[in-house]
Amino acid sequence: MGKSDENSLGLVGSMNLQGGGGKIMPAANTGPTRRALSAINKNIIEPPSYPYAVNNKRSLSGRNAICNKPPVHRPITRKFAAQLADNKPQIRDEENINVDDNDKEEGGDFNEPMFVQHTEAMMEEIEMEDAEEKEEQVINIDACDEKNPLAVVEYIEDIYNFYKKIEEHSCVAPNYMENQKDLNERMRGILIDWLIEVHYKFELMEETLYLTISVIDRFLAVHQIVRKKLQLVGVTALLLACKYEEVSVPVVDDLILISDKAYSRREVLDMEKLMANTLQFNFSLPTPYVFMKRFLKAAQSDKKLEVLSFFIIDLCLVEYEMLEYPPSKLAASAVYTAQCALNGFEEWSKTCEFHTGYKQEQLLECARKMVAFHHKAGAGKLTGVHRKYNTSKFSYAARTEPAGFLL
């Protein structure tokens, strides 16, 4: 193709109208003003640079300078080119497209677009982080008492760690009645059920009742007693506990009176000396009561939960078989059982687990026995605990439905 042919096809020079006849004459040669056809075709195939802006006030040569500038464009993949050609989302045909492992790793054709996989991975990480954040935290139950000097917040953890270490010394063998020739576990239950009523009538402190039971069991575990002296042991244990816990101690004559004058003053005082010497005057061992106060605080209890928890553990005081459990486990199980009865489902928080030292699974066996005692509380002859907690003073806790689903 000659030069004239090339101008006729692809190059059009600047035109000037000269003469009246309208003859068109070529203007002076000012250099090439249009590109070759091959360059134009190249720009059609490849996308223009972004952004692409033209100033209308520029001369033709200025426009050509912009057009002749090499385009800066993003690389076009096979997948993107096909989408542009069809002008619709590409649907992968698994039968017709073969993708090797390298293409999958590099983000080629895959079951899901890379941005979908990346988004799902991010969402999973966010959900895992949210789950960790929402995981229950242990509450600082002593924060509200930091300014209360009587709460001894600085030492409270050390105190209860000490209680947990020495509580085994307050426990007795769960079969100690086998060493008593004239007593049995049924007699022990009758004595304690009667003492619970006496304690209630005298309006004594709760600590006094638990210490009384502890003194009785520890004494009977190491000393032989005949049946007719068993009530004397109970009355004397109550007197010792009152001297240790109470501000105002009942007089000996009152204790003789409630025993229907079965014993003399001298017998009471002699038994007091015998029991104190046998126990080596050690009345400072932890009872379930000290653990109950701490565990109820960990459970963030209200009045209802507190009263029901004490009702359940008082039922256990009468039962000889519950001597197999240490005081801390009895207290934790009572709180757990009361929570289940009030809420209708199992509930044992991380805070309770931390402060009690017991997981929910460790309490289930003891809790099931407590539910059974709750079921039969008002039946039979030993109903002292039920009558005590079936009063307005204790919010009629004995009328609460037991957590039967634990059984």
Image (cartoon, helix red, strand yellow):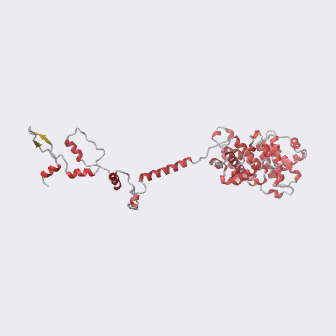
Which residue occupies 21% across, 42% down? 62
Which quarter of the figure has residue 238?
Answer: top right
Find residue 263 and report its horizontal and vertical position in percent: 90, 46
Between 190 and 249, the one nearer to me in the picture? 190
Q: Residue at x 88, y 53 (%)?
A: 227
Q: Whole-percent x and y of residue 96?
A: 38, 61
Q: Pinpoint residue 160: horizontal percent, then vertical percent.
A: 68, 47
Instruction: Please tell me whether residue 67 is drawn above or below residue 109 in the rendered image.
Output: above
User: As drawn, which residue projects farthest toward the front?
Assistant: 21
Image quadrant where one finds the N terminus: bottom left
Residue sitting nearer the eye, 81 or 95: 95
Residue 363 place in picture, x, y as percent: 69, 52
Residue 67 visible to an observer of this rendering: yes
Q: Nearer the viewer, residue 153 or 198?
A: 198
- Total numbered labels: 0
Residue 281 visible? The answer is no
